[in-house]
Image (cartoon, rainbow, N blue to C red):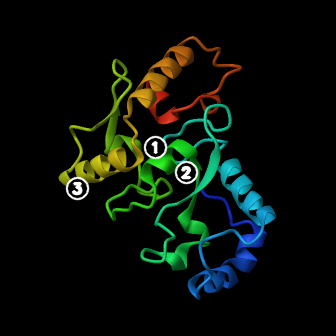
Amino acid sequence: MYTFIRDASPACLALRWEEWTDRYCSGDKGFKWYSPKYYENVRQKLFESSLQHCAFCDGLTGAESRQTIEHFKPKERHAFPELAFHWANLYPCCDRCQSQKGSRYDPALLNPDDLEYHFDDYFVANYLTGEIEVSPLASAENCHRAHVTLELYGLNLGIRTARRKREAQLFQHRNPETEPLDDFSYRYFLKNC
């Protein structure tokens, strides 16, 4: 994960989130965005904030995966329905991370826009395998949180490790003047490459 800097909520969500939450919690059949236009505004704002990267795997979205909105704490009625439209619970996410996590949640899950989150406190990059490993220097609590995050988002699935290795090769042969780090997937993985 790369630290996610959250911009201010889009106006449509700031104005309507409480109304939509009441509507959803009071018995609407299932979750839905009450307007495709509003969904698109929220999705666009999230991905502008992340420079088109997924907040969890940090892959660039659009070419290899679809852009979705992730509910960090699940929106289902048995979980956190009151957060279904809450700006701080919404993240830019690729469809792979969202499918892997589904509606699972663990309080130990790392939050990418937590001001205390720093990749190096939890993880190390293995450039030979393409894996993200739990840092041997991490505290016991940070170790647990790293394991939970890796597992829930499937960050070390085979296809992901192969893509990180490929991206590291491309990054090493780039022109730094015309190809900045933000143009690549997996910035947390590449920053010390």
Q: Disc 3 marks which amino acid?
A: Glu
Numbered mark located on residue 1 in the image: 1
Q: Earlier in the sequence, mark 2 or mark 3?
A: 2
User: Could you tell me which residue is drawn at 49 percent across and 49 percent down?
Assistant: 99
Q: Earlier in the sequence, mark 1 or mark 3?
A: 1
CA neighbours of label 3 inside 10 A, class few (<14), some (14 to 19), many (20+)? few
Give the structural element (helix, strand or loop) at label 2. loop
Mark 1 in CB contact with mark 2 (< 8 angstroms): yes
Disc 1/disc 3 C-alpha distance (Å): 17 Å
Picture layout, residue 70 above or below residue 13: above
Q: Is residue 56 visible?
A: yes
CA neighbours of label 2 inside 10 A, class few (<14), some (14 to 19), many (20+)? many
Disc 2/disc 3 C-alpha distance (Å): 22 Å
User: Could you tell me which residue is drawn at 62 percent across and 72 percent down?
Assistant: 85
Task: Tell me the residue that label 2 is attached to.
Answer: 4
Give coordinates of residue 6: x percent, y percent.
Answer: 61, 58
Mark 2 in CB contact with mark 3 (< 8 angstroms): no
Q: Quadrant of the C terminus?
A: top left
Task: Tell me the residue that label 3 is attached to.
Answer: 141
User: Could you tell me which residue is drawn at 52 percent across and 42 percent down?
Assistant: 96
Q: Is residue 69 left or right of residue 35?
A: left
Q: Nearer the viewer, residue 87 or 65?
A: 65
Q: Disc 1 marks which amino acid?
A: Met
